Amino acid sequence: MTPRNSALTLKQQLDRLTNRLHELAGWRDHAQLPIQEVKFSDVTGKTSTLAVGQGWPSRAFPVSLTFSISIPPEWAGQCVMLHADPGARRWSSSTGVPSADSIPFTVTTCC
């Protein structure tokens, strides 16, 4: 079985890959602004601030996570998105309470 692009020279294959990388650049985040603190509220109304590395202060679910952020002026006119990755948390084996290894929210520009 021959490779799919075997008719192309090495230079042609490299040119093709270079072009593909330029195409993919449009799908990447161009700038990121990590959110350092998140306000944590549980179903009982208990509120606190959750920082990177801090364990969650309550086991009462569901919870509400809110934050405040200022979009930099140089991002004006660009698409801005919030990336939320709740999978970034982990469960502490000693307490059974979720802990934020990193705050699972990042604001990014795209396109």
Image (tube, helix red, strand yellow):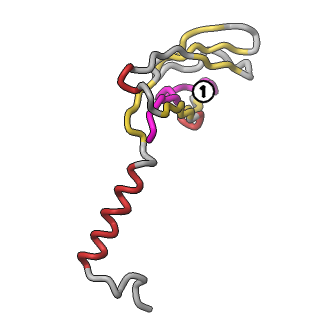
- Note whether 55 is above or below 49 in the view shown: below
Say which residue appears at 54% left-offset and 11% top-offset. Answer: 49
Judged left or right of residue 101, residue 72 is left
Residue drawn at x 45%, y 39% as measured from the top left: 110
- Label count reads 1
Give the residue displayed 41% in from the left and 54% down from the top. Answer: 24
Span of residues in magenta: 94-111
Nearer to us in this view, 13 or 93 = 13
Residue 93 lies in what quarter of the image?
Answer: top right
Give the residue at the far front of this rendering: 77
Q: Secondary structure at mark 1?
A: strand
x and y percentages locating residue 3 in the rendered image: 40, 85
Query: Callout 1 environment at 10 Å: few (<14), some (14 to 19), or many (20+)?
Result: some
**Percent from the top left, x then y, of residue 39?**
58, 13
Magenta span includes 110: yes
106 drawn magenta: yes
Tell me residue 44's x, y (percent).
76, 10
Residue 26, image x and y in percent?
42, 48
User: Is residue 17 toward the left or the right of residue 109 in the image?
Assistant: left
Q: Which residue is mark 1?
A: 98
Between 48 and 1, the one lying in front of the other is 1
The residue type indicated by label 1 comes to: Pro
Q: Kindly indicate the quadrant of the structure image that contains residue 55.
A: top right
The quarter of the image holding the N terminus is: bottom left
Furthest-left residue in this view: 11
Quadrant occupied by the C terminus = top left
User: Residue at position x 45%, y 16% from top?
Assistant: 70
Judge from the rendering whether residue 13 lies leftward or rightward of residue 34; answer left or right: left
Relative depth, front residue between 46 and 93: 46
